[in-house]
Amino acid sequence: MTSSLSLAPTLSLAPGVDIPLLGLGTWPMNDEEAAAAVAEALRLGYRHVDTAENYGNERGVGEGLRRSGVAREAVFITTKFNRQWHSVDGARQACEASLARLGVAYIDLLLVHWPNPDQDRFVEAFQGLVKLHEAGLVRAIGTSNFKPAHLERLFELGLLPQLNQIQLDPYHRRDDLLAIHRRKGIVTGAWRPLGCGNAMLADPVIAGIAEAHGRTSAQVVLRWIVQQGIVATPKSANPERLAQNLDIFSFSLSEAEMAALDTLDRPDPTMLDADSFGH
């Protein structure tokens, strides 16, 4: 049996529920690619895997878990459901379908994938998550891509996500959401933490810090994220990069380096807008 020891530190997500700060992202892998990547990542010491109904690879994630030999209870699994399930009963159907595809008895963290405000049912979807948590089918609940106005709708009803997963990297700092998360005690998750393409990783500020530490630009970006207490789930199927991504807890960035990275935020008109995009 492979060791259950995670090489990544954890954050408290809910009473008795800890989430590793670094996980494996699996979009856009297919089932076979996900199975191979998950098995390899768990072998290397990952203990957190992020998937979604919309990725179409939950079966592969479950297969990778079984191939790894790591005990189910040692692995934190996050998944998400689509807009068609945005109701209390729909959330239950979505959860049961994900459980069947993953081949597990419970989900560690289940998220509403996008708010889809055009159909205005994300509040009911989250109320469905609350019932799933009460039923013991999920250990923690949250949201993905919720903007401040979407979160406020939940807060008005006394509903509180335990995590909100958002696009976040040095070029997309998301300070408005981070302030709300801190105030409400919501954990922040970062998807696409290494940016879009290689342009950000070639940024001279990032490359310079990487050179000073003898690290890769990707390692510096991931370190900047986790050093803020934000959960990162970078995608890779390459064993060398998987190992590099996990090896970010053996160094730290100085206050000056963190501040330099903080200056890189910039407008991005192509960024997906949760008021108009979703699935």
Image (cartoon, rainbow, N blue to C red):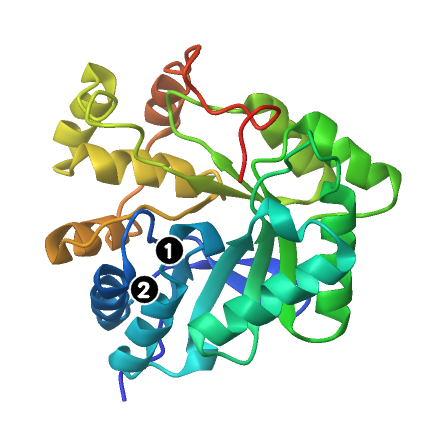
Q: How many marks?
A: 2
The correct choice, above or below, for 58 with respect to 104 in the image is: above
Question: Camera-side residue: 137 or 71?
Answer: 137
Q: Would you name the residue on which mark 2 appears?
A: 46
Looking at the rendered structure, the kind of residue marked 2 is Tyr
- Residue 242 has which mark? none
Q: Quadrant of residue 196?
A: top left
In the picture of the structure, the residue carrying the numbered disc 1 is 23
Left or right side of 35 for 145: right
- Which sits in the foreground, 246 or 95? 95
Residue visible at 41% across and 20% down in the picture: 262
Where is residue 267? Give x, y as percent: 44, 10
* Percent position of residue 116, x then y: 64, 35
Q: Give the SS element for disc 1.
A: loop
Q: Quadrant of the N terminus?
A: bottom left
Rendered view: 224 above or below 65: above
Asked whether, in this view, residue 186 is left or right of residue 247, the answer is right
| Residue at 40% in and 37% down | 225
Upstream in sequence: badge 2 or badge 1: 1
Q: Callout 2: helix, strand or loop?
A: loop
Separation (CA) of disc 2 from disc 1? 6 Å
Residue 158 rendering spot, x and y as whole percentages: 86, 46
Q: Is residue 14 above or below residue 67?
A: above
Camera-side residue of 274 and 207:
274
- What is the three-letter code of the residue carrying label 1? Gly
| Picture layout, residue 115 above or below residue 30 | above
Q: Position of residue 3 (x, y in %)?
A: 30, 81
Q: Residue at x 20, y 32 (%)?
A: 217
Give the crowd class for mark 1: few <14, some 14-19, many >=20 residues within 10 Å. many
Q: Are marks 2 and 1 in contact (CB under 8 Å)?
A: yes
